[in-house]
Image: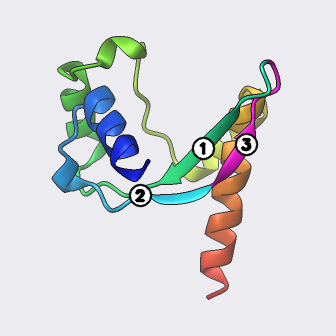
């Protein structure tokens, strides 16, 4: 499962696996429409957002999405209420992870 998420990130964004940290499973959210689970992972990348945008343009599976965005945590929080249900759940899991790490 963890190798698979790294492979997906590499194929869909074009960033090399060597630039990613090991993925951390932060939780599972249930999709509202078809009630399937969606797993959410956290990884850091040591490449800046402008270079990631360039890599994305040449990604192997870049056709699976239409655009990549780099946004601040504040901007993501502001737009979170417009996300589909399972993605909103994923953002909630991300916030829980961030809050837990700040209290360590």
Q: Is residue 60 magenta?
A: no
Residue 65, how many percent across, how many down? 42, 16
Answer yes or no: do the residues labelled 1 and 2 have beta carbons within 8 Å? no
Residue 89 appears in the figure = yes
Residue 79 appears in the figure = no
Q: Earlier in the sequence, mark 1 or mark 2?
A: 2
The residue tagged 2 is 23
Q: Nearer the viewer, residue 29 or 79?
A: 29
What label sits on residue 39 in the rendered view?
1
In the image, residue 46 above or below residue 40: below
Q: Which residues are magenta?
A: 27-33
For label 3, the crowd category at 10 Å Cα-Cα, with few meaning under 14, some 14 to 19 and many 20 or more, is: many
Residue 19, how many percent across, how many down? 21, 54
Distance from disc 1 to disc 3, alpha carbons, whole Å, reads 7 Å
Distance from disc 3 to disc 2, alpha carbons, whole Å, reads 17 Å
**Residue at the (41%, 56%) spot, across then down:** 43
Q: Nearer the viewer, residue 55 or 21?
A: 21
Q: Tell me: 90 left or right of 22.
A: right
Q: Secondary structure at mark 2?
A: loop
What label sits on residue 29 in the rendered view?
3
Q: Tell me: 94 left or right of 13.
A: right
**Residue at the (78%, 34%) spot, across then down:** 81
Residue 64, how many percent across, how many down? 40, 15
Residue 26 location, quadrant: bottom right
Q: Earlier in the sequence, mark 3 or mark 2?
A: 2
**Residue at the (44%, 47%) spot, across then down:** 1
Q: Is residue 30 magenta?
A: yes
What label sits on residue 8 in the rendered view?
none
For label 2, the crowd category at 10 Å Cα-Cα, with few meaning under 14, some 14 to 19 and many 20 or more, is: some
């Amino acid at each position: 499962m963890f190798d698979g998420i790294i492979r997906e990130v590499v194929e869909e964004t074009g960033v090399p696996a060597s630039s990613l940290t090991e993925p951390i499973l932060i939780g599972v959210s249930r999709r509202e429409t078809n009630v399937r689970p969606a797993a959410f992972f956290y990884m850091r990348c040591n490449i800046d957002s402008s270079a990631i945008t360039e890599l994305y343009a040449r990604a192997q599976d870049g056709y699976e999405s239409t655009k990549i965005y780099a946004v601040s945590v504040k901007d993501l929080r502001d737009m979170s209420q417009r996300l589909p249900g399972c993605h909103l759940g994923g953002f909630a899991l991300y916030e829980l992870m961030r809050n837990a790490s700040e209290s360590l």
